[in-house]
């Protein structure tokens, strides 16, 4: 058997999963967990619905809250083979405690004396601190900051 690839509305994967579950569809949406505990979809905007003979008409998927529709190539529905889904499930545990920022990401300070100032993320410094490169008074300074006070620019 195989899985249909479904496109969700932006940032509505949780809503789509809840409504598919309420309709008793067999679906799969892989998740990753950030280092701050926040869960995010591994493939933002996509999930998979199992193609099995059942009494549920697939046309109900299109009208499910949070779903835009089926991914298609012309008139052909996109499908993911069981082997691909099994492979994703096997590797899903690798995406736990993923860092929020990567080196050289542009970040902005959310609060404190440097609120609104853009910097470059360098690395983690412990569990709750990070080192950023902050250009201040025409000099680049490595500054340790609380990771929760940063956001992507």
Image (cartoon, rainbow, N blue to C red):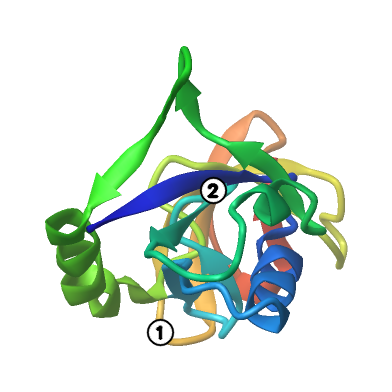
Q: Is residue 87 above or below residue 138?
A: below
Q: Residues within 10 Å of mark 1 (few under 14, many from 20)?
A: few
Q: Is residue 103 above or below residue 35?
A: above
Residue at horizontal 46 percent and vertical 51 percent from the top: 43
First-in-chain label (1 vs 2): 1
Residue at horizontal 67 percent and vertical 54 percent from the top: 61
- The quarter of the picture where the N terminus appears is bottom left
SS category of the residue bearing label 2: strand
Residues at circles 1 and 2 in contact by the CB criterion of under 8 Å? no
- Residue 77, percent across and down? 43, 32
Asked if residue 146 can be seen in this view, the reply is: no
- The quarter of the picture where the C terminus appears is top right
Disc 1 to disc 2, C-alpha distance: 19 Å
In this rendering, would 65 be left or right of 142? Answer: right
In this rendering, would 137 be left or right of 84? Answer: right
Front residue of this view, candidates 89 and 105: 89
Front residue of this view, candidates 23 and 117: 23
Q: Is residue 41 above or below residue 34?
A: above
SS category of the residue bearing label 1: loop
- Residue 109, percent across and down? 76, 55
Q: Residues within 10 Å of mark 2 (few under 14, many from 20)?
A: some
Residue at horizontal 18 percent and vertical 55 percent from the top: 84
Q: Which residue is mark 2?
A: 141
Q: Which residue is mark 1?
A: 126
In this rendering, would 90 be left or right of 146? Answer: left
Asked if residue 35 can be seen in this view, the reply is: yes
Front residue of this view, candidates 131 and 92: 92
In this rendering, would 102 be left or right of 118? Answer: left
Q: Viewer-nearest of labels 1 and 2?
A: 1
């Amino acid at each position: 058997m195989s899985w249909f690839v479904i496109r969700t509305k932006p940032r509505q994967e949780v809503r789509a999963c809840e409504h598919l579950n309420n309709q008793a569809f067999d679906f799969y949406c892989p998740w990753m967990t950030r280092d701050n505990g926040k869960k995010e979809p591994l493939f933002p905007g996509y999930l998979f619905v199992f193609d099995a003979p059942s009494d549920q008409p697939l046309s109900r998927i299109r009208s499910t809250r949070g779903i835009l529709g089926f991914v298609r190539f012309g008139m052909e529905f996109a499908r993911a083979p069981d082997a691909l889904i099994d492979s994703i499930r096997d590797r899903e545990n690798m995406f736990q405690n993923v860092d929020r920022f990567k080196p050289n990401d542009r970040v902005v300070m959310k609060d404190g004396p440097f609120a609104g100032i853009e910097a470059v993320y360098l690395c983690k410094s412990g569990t709750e601190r990070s080192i950023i490169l902050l250009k201040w008074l025409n000099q680049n300074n490595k500054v340790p900051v609380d990771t929760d006070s940063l956001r992507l620019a």
